[in-house]
Amino acid sequence: MDTNLSHSEKRTLKNFVALYALLSFSILLLISILYLDVERDLMLRKKQVLLEEYAKELIQKLKYVHINLDKTRKYPRSENYKSAIFDSSKNLIFSTLKNKKVNLDDKLYKTENIIHFIKQPSSYYLGSYYVVVEIVDDELWLNGVYKKLFIYAGSLFFIFLIVGYFLSRLFLRPMREAIEMLERFIQDTTHELNTPISTINMNIEMLDSKRLDERSKIKIERIKIASQTLSHLYDDLSFLLLNHKVISNDEELNLKELIEERLNYFEQIANVKKVSLNFVCNKEQTILIDRKKMIKLLDNLISNAIKYNKISGDVIVILDEHTVVIKDSGQGIKRRDLKAVFDRFERFNYAQGGFGIGLHIVNVIAKEYGLNVDIESKENIGTEVSITW
Amino acid sequence: MVKNIFFILLLVSALEANRFEANCASCHKLFPVEIDKFLYRYILKYSSEESVKVALAEYLSNPTREKSVMPEPFILRFGIKKPSDLNGTELQNAIDDYWLMYKIEGTLY
């Protein structure tokens, strides 16, 4: 039984992983930003003690200049810090600051690698309502923070990965169980179909048509068509279940002969819908492939072209150099559904019967032999399937 | 004509300057405390140009002990001055001249 992840499972898993990764990344990013903010705040609090000392020292020096204005107007400076003074209207009186942009409403803050501390003295020496002290942050503390962040975020990410793995298993379990149940059901049904289909086919073949009246002949023809359809379905399901266990027996096939044979095979089914089957052979072609698999590929495409066609529609099979084209005049496939046509159990038209495995089988065979399958479809105009190699 | 207007403007501005000299500086020369020290006390208390000028105008037009920025011993010794005879605009111009002459901002180096 094929229990590999199907396209839809992969897509679901991919979406889940993307969403989970995005969520995990967002959480980690948020935690990192908060942690960085806390560490930065802690660093500023530590620096504040020093900055308070510098501010006091500066105010003392401002006081000295204020008292001795008739002797000196030299603004006090220090090697340890830069400074500025602003009046109560926030006009600059004097500044030695490196970063001239000052936010007087914030007491302590850091811009890039510059720390500003704002103090309001009790007396406004030289008019200084705001005293700004500036120091440069060497940012050595950041190295430690980044190291810690790397360890913590890495550990958290690892934990998220483990949780994600279990979550994805939990998440996919119902889908996997449903698919396994469906596959088990098909396997059992296929097994049970084998004997009755063989019996019907064998008995139809054994009937002597010459001894039947016209009405019975028509009835037998209908039974034959129904049996053919069942046979086709049985073959598809068998292929799906046994594909990986069947050894290919490749041979040079004459495609012209094979297409004619298959169109002939589908003639009765096409007649029911009054669909005309046409074959255009522009160039005779041979291909090295397993006969049964090529028949399966063609049968599925021709069968779809008939099944999804309108009453009195057309099916045209064109054989050209390294190309087989099967065109129909059916209802077409919606553009958004085209991506998933090869998915197993994917069906876009529930008016017709089927399991949604035909094009999946076509794709499996095409992949095995390196054939390209292109589908172009326009709603209410028709579908064109091209096989190239 | 232009020369005349220029001359009149120069005369008016000279008269304005004389008003500060005549109405303020002339009396303060008699004090042992220089006139700029008063402004520095105002700056120490009011900080900005706007606040200092408002406080000065209020005090000069209606001087009281409470409004004075000078210390108690100074007031006890020299008392409170009389309200200014200058009208609002004249007083404002005199205060502006005073500020320009002794302000700290722009003089630090």
Image (cartoon, coloured by chain):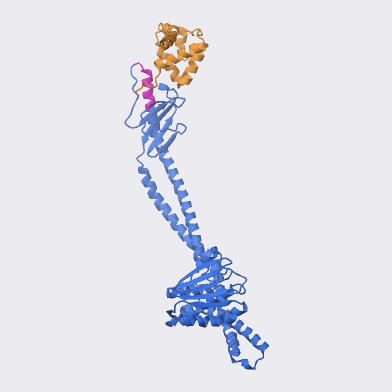
Chain colours: A blue, B orange
In this view, B50 is above or below B30: below
In this view, B8 is above or below A299: above
User: Where is residue B4, by image quadrant?
Assistant: top left
The quadrant of the picture occupied by the C terminus of chain A is: bottom left
In the image shown, does B6 or B21 lie closer to the viewer?
B6
Q: Residue at x 56, y 80 (%)?
A: A266
In this view, A64 is above or below A266: above
Q: Residue at x 57, y 84 (%)?
A: A194
Residue located farthest toward the left when viewing the structure as drawn: A79
In the image shown, does A166 or A218 lie closer to the viewer?
A218
> Residue A315 placed where, x, y %?
55, 75
In the rendered structure, the answer to whether residue A76 lies left or right of residue A305 reads left
User: Where is residue A215, by image quadrant?
Assistant: bottom right
Q: Is residue A275 magenta?
A: no
> Residue A4 placed where, x, y %?
48, 71
Q: Is the stretch drawn in magenta largely helix, strand or loop?
A: helix
Q: Specify the segment rendered in magenta.
A: A57-70
In the rendered structure, the answer to whether residue B28 lies left or right of residue B66 reads left
In the rendered structure, the answer to whether residue A101 lies left or right of residue A238 reads left
In this view, A223 is above or below A36: below
Q: Is residue A205 visible?
A: yes
> Residue A32 placed where, x, y %?
44, 48
> Residue A178 placed where, x, y %?
56, 70
In the image shown, does A180 or A78 lie closer to the viewer?
A180
Q: Residue at x 39, y 40 (%)?
A: A112
Q: Is residue A65 magenta?
A: yes
Number of dots carrying numbers: 0
Q: Is residue B70 visible?
A: no
